[in-house]
Image (spheres, coloured by chain):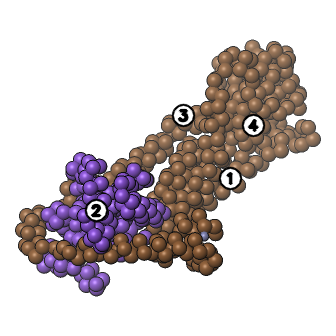
Chain colours: A purple, B brown
Amino acid sequence: MNNMEHIQWIRRSRAGDSRAFAHLYEAYKDLVYRTAYLLLDDPAEAQDALQETFLQAYRALNSYDPRRSAFSTWLYRITVNHCLNRRRARRPLVHLPPAQFESIASPIDLEGEISENLQLQRALEHLSEKLRVVVVLRYFLDLSYAEMAEVLEIPLGTVQSRLNQALQNLRRALQAAKQPGENFGLEEEVSE
Amino acid sequence: MNCKEVNGRLLSYIHGEVTPSEKRLITAHLSACLECTAKLESMESLESRVRRHIQQRAERVAAPASGWQALQARLDKEPVSRSNGFLSALRPPFFGLPLSGWQFAAAAFLVFLALFTLTPAARAQMQAQIQQIAGGWFNFSSPDGQSQAEIGGFSAFTPYHATYLPEGFQLSGMGGSSALDKETITLGYNNQEKFVDLAQSAGTPLEALPQGEHLVLNGSTAVFVEDFARSAQELQEKIPAISIVIEYDYTHTNLLVWDMGEIRLQMLSNLPKDEMVRIAESLAPMQGGRLPAAQTGGGSGWGGLEFLIILLFGWAGIALGLVLATLGLLKRSLPFGIAGLLLGLPFSFYLLATPSGWPFGLSLPLLLGVSAYACSKPGRLKLGWISLILAGAIVLGIFVLTR
Ligand SMILES: [Zn+2]
């Protein structure tokens, strides 16, 4: 992506040129939409998040300072904040009764890769929000630790420990899922 | 590095987020340790599995094609000025500052507090209180051994008290002022018609002795000024700080000035010269410490709390604060940075209460605040270090100046 071009678009968008803003939208829509989808697990909500993120970005564009952070970092911060607020608002709904995990987690009727992916997906869904966000930022957006720290506004050391914790939790959950009769490993999930 | 340390850093090592020296140490360990190598491989395989899964899942969806039209319809409804709403104004950046609304509020509160403490009345009150608690304490007995007194808040020097006084004289009052550059303590003695006012100060370079009759007092030069003042009014004009007592006769007020080490002593009295010299020669240093509570008629009950406050307001507090702030920057940990700032506050307030130290009292918390802020912002580390070094320099400078 051409950085100079982006700065031009940002400048023109600030002046009220919506075609310039359309360029920014086109450049980032898939990254933002997919990030939102990975955080919210719902295409309709992700679509909503995409709209809200760009609307907020448009409103706050005057306060964006290109010397301080990359536009992408700034935009991801808005995306992540929006998605986390969204998740918090619906929090009671995502807590499924434990019986349901077990039936999903035990790979009796599913075979091979599909089953493994399903296990991994379940494990991801049961990471805490904080841990899930670092996984998405790292493995989908390929952000460096410093960029993640900027997006999440947390210290570098916290990024590192959250990523470590996330992988540890995923490994435990996957190991637990491989052993029939055992729980999904949720009890072992260590919260920060 | 041992296995445990290596394990904790494996992920950062894989991601290339370790320092070159750490990288060398880990590589060396891995080449010799099968267990850790196995862990590295399993970590890498888990990671690539997670990455692949997430990428695949993401690629299954894409932003809807109608997205821009829908967004544009909403953008058109936005006010042209695009001024931020009240709530969005509370999110960072706030007025272009890298602060959120609540951080800004906290900073504003600190500035307000600082400005409040800059008003002379508030400063004076705070100064008195801090010195009451954190200052040094001295005690002394009257020449006849009948009574004892204590005085607090003066730590730059050990004050003197008279061990000889003419018949009927007793301690009538004690007072003082303390500043970063000068500390003064005044003892007043009197009987029915005569008085002795003894001011002792330390801190500034000693001024030249005034014009007058030269004497030798305890081996050093003293100056005696006969009839320094001939009326209460004249005395008041020459020494505005003096408190006039109506019963006294001020028509022959003499002045005796001399130095004892780095302390300048000035004795004002309507006693004759030989009595004044005799009192001056009898001066002895006060004893350190407070009187036992029983002798002062009731203890203050501070105990451990007093000790804690002395630690906080003194060098221990600020030194620990600087150490924590340094750790905060090294570990990039915001809580450490904030702890450093908090521990720096009492010392800063102490400085604010001094006439010449207040600019430092103001800048110290600001610098520590910037350093704390930088702990959480990787891009601001340099700024944090510069602030912390400046804060350290201020503290060191004050330490050297006040020794
Ligand atoms: Zn090892």
- Which percent across, then down, holds residue B351? 58, 46
Q: Chain of mark 1?
A: B
* Mark 4 neighbour class, 10 Å CA radius: few under 14, some 14 to 19, many 20 or more: many
Q: Is residue A68 left or right of residue B246?
A: left
Question: Any atom of ligand 1 within 8 Å of the CB at mark 4?
Answer: no
Residue tagged 4: B200
Looking at numbered disc 2 in the image, what kind of residue is underneath it? Ile
Tell me the SS state at disc 2: loop
Residue found at x 26% / y 67%: A110
Residue tagged 1: B399
Check contact, mark 3 vs mark 4: CB within 8 A.
no
- The residue mark sitting in front, 3 or 4, is 3
- Which percent across, then down, holds residue B279? 85, 27
Cα separation between marks 2 and 4:
92 Å
Q: Which mark is residue A108?
A: 2
Question: Any atom of ligand 1 within 8 Å of the CB at mark 1?
Answer: no
Nearer-N-terminus badge (4/1): 4
Q: Chain of mark 2?
A: A
Cα separation between marks 2 and 3:
77 Å
* Mark 3 neighbour class, 10 Å CA radius: few under 14, some 14 to 19, many 20 or more: few
Cα separation between marks 4 and 1:
23 Å
- Which percent across, then down, holds residue A105? 30, 59
